[in-house]
Image (cartoon, coloured by chain):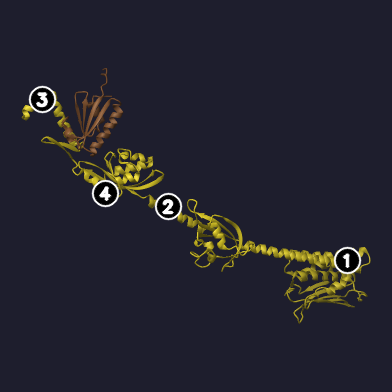
Chain colours: A brown, B yellow
Amino acid sequence: MAEAPSEPVKLVLYVAGETPKSLAAIRNLEKICSEHLAGKYRVEVIDLKKQPQLAREHGIVAIPTLVKALPVPIRKIIGDLSDTQKVLVHLSVEE
Amino acid sequence: MTVVSLVSALTRDELEARLYEAEETLRAIREGEIDAVVIKGGATEQVFTLEGGEQSYRTFMEAMDIGAAAFDREGQLIYANQALCTLLDRPADALSGQALLGLFDPVNQTTFRRLLTQALKERQSAEIHVRIGNADRSFLLTGTPIDFGIVSGVAITFTDISEREQSAAAKESERLARSILASANEAVIVCDRAGNVTHINAAAERICAEAPIGKSFEDAIELTFADATELMSGADIVAMAASGTPVQGLEAAVKTSSADVTDVLISAAPLIVSGDRTQGCVVTLINLSQRKAAERRQALLMGELDHRVKNTLAMVLAISARTASHVRTIEDFQKSFAGRIQALAATHTLLSNASWENLQIKDVLSVELAPYTTLSGGRITMEGLDIAVDSKTAVSLGLVFHELTTNAVKYGALSTRSGKLSVRRVGLAEDGALLIEWEERDGPLVTAPTKSGFGQTLISRSLGSGPGGGTKLEFLPTGVVCQISIPKYGHFHS
């Protein structure tokens, strides 16, 4: 299957300050991005501790949660992103 | 809107997505992958962290003086307190994730990882070493399990033990230095800048005053410099060395209670402990006593030899002059002179073999009579002559015995087969002189010579210098009799 002209993946990671799982999610995402999505992503980290109202946009309940905002459809990955394969499947990026 | 109407308003895809999200949230909570939730309260949202007092351990750690850090189960740094940042000289963000581990070398990384793993279960300690800036630091790490609400991890404290280790190393080093000092053969004395003794080894204790530590160098050891002027003193040497000028190899006499050490070779060097600053000086003293005693003995022997050579030459000249005045022909002179010089040489050989000491009268006589004793068949007897004499007396006796023997061979008891010769100790005179008698018998009839030859003069004059010394020569018709008297003091040892 031919790949669609690459549209940058926009990811939004919702964290709650520096809780262990928030920090773990940031680290895991950095690793996945650098290893599997090099140059094809844009990441925004939103600290809901500081701006809780931003949870509304993507209806965030559990933290940490990663939202693939673009390309549609929107996908949510809940948890600390420690399962790399699962994250890649949800981001529709398969090796 | 009721739940039913909400659900009916969603498309199937949306519904599936929401269901999936709910399931995922539950799974994530169950597996401990989330630790905060957003609660909608009216128009506002609030975030609650599931570990409850999430800030509490941080607040607590921050209040600690020692370095502390929290790690998750995977060994990722969650938090490092300010004290640890200061200890490691890194800002907090430079330690995040695995960055802290990157400060360590492979060996210490292994130690650290093992500690992280073990401390998940129980309290564990380990020591790690890390280079910070230009300094090697040592830390005692203690790790204990810690719960962050729903997740667990490890809290580790970092105690800087570098100074403790350096202090232990310094103590060990000092112990080593002390044992080197103590094991040295040479006497070693260490003084501070003021010239007071601070350290001393066992060899130095033997030549120092009692309790020398704390005393000035001059009070601790009494030195006299043989080759130097009175201006030179022990304090001068110490002051020179302490000011940075080494002093090497000065000989000095030392006054001690021990007779073993009388002379020393003294050297002093500046004591530089660190940097260029002189902390005092190290004085070493090598025991020269034996060498100096040998030198003195050698000097004495040289003087003695010089004296003896001069005496001998004077004697040779006298013998030569006297012999010349009593003979008529060159042939006579050669014969007499050679005989007398040979007698002198024979006695010298004996003396030198006996190291110029403890030569016995018997030895001196035997040399002169040697050519005749083997053929004498018991005609020659010696009695009580096992008496040691000094070198001067031995030389005189040698010449006397030579003249008597020559005379006996030419005209006396040894000129015939029947003649007998007896040399014996008669006894001691009243003044303590030793009396020896040379007696010839059964030889040709003796008549006293009409004029006195040199031999006779020599015999009469020999041994006449000291009190009680001298010889008395008689030409009895039965044979020559000579009374030899050896002065007591210092000339013989009975």
* Residue labelled with disc 2: B169
Query: Around disc 4, counting alpha carbons within 10 Å, would you say few (fewer than 14), some (14 to 19), or many (20 or more)?
Result: few
Q: Nearer the viewer, mark 2 or mark 1?
A: 2
Which of the two labelled residues, at mark 4 and mark 2, occupies the earlier sequence position?
A: 4
- Image side of residue B197 versus residue B447, left or right: left
Give SS at disc 1.
helix
At which x and y percent is residue B358? 72, 69
* Residue labelled with disc 3: B10
Q: Can residue B483 be seen in this view?
A: no
Please, what is the three-letter code of the amino acid marked with disc 2? Ala
Give the distance between the C-alpha atoms of the residues marked 4 and 3, in whole angstroms. Answer: 52 Å
At which x and y percent is residue B152? 23, 42
At which x and y percent is residue B266? 58, 59
Which of the two labelled residues, at mark 3 and mark 1, occupies the earlier sequence position?
A: 3
Q: Please tell me in which quadrant of the rendered image residue B237 appears.
A: bottom right
Which of the two labelled residues, at mark 4 and mark 3, occupies the earlier sequence position?
A: 3
Q: Which residue occupies 26% across, 49% down? A: B63
Split into 4 quadrants, where in the image is the C terminus of chain B?
A: bottom right
- Which chain does tag 2 point to? B
Which of the two labelled residues, at mark 2 and mark 1, occupies the earlier sequence position?
A: 2
Please, what is the three-letter code of the amino acid marked with disc 3? Leu
**Residue B336 - label:** 1
Q: Please tell me in which quadrant of the rendered image residue B104 appears.
A: top left
Give the distance between the C-alpha atoms of the residues marked 4 and 2, in whole angstroms. Answer: 32 Å
Q: Vertically, is B148 above or below A5?
A: below
Farthest residue, direction top: A2
* Residue labelled with disc 4: B63
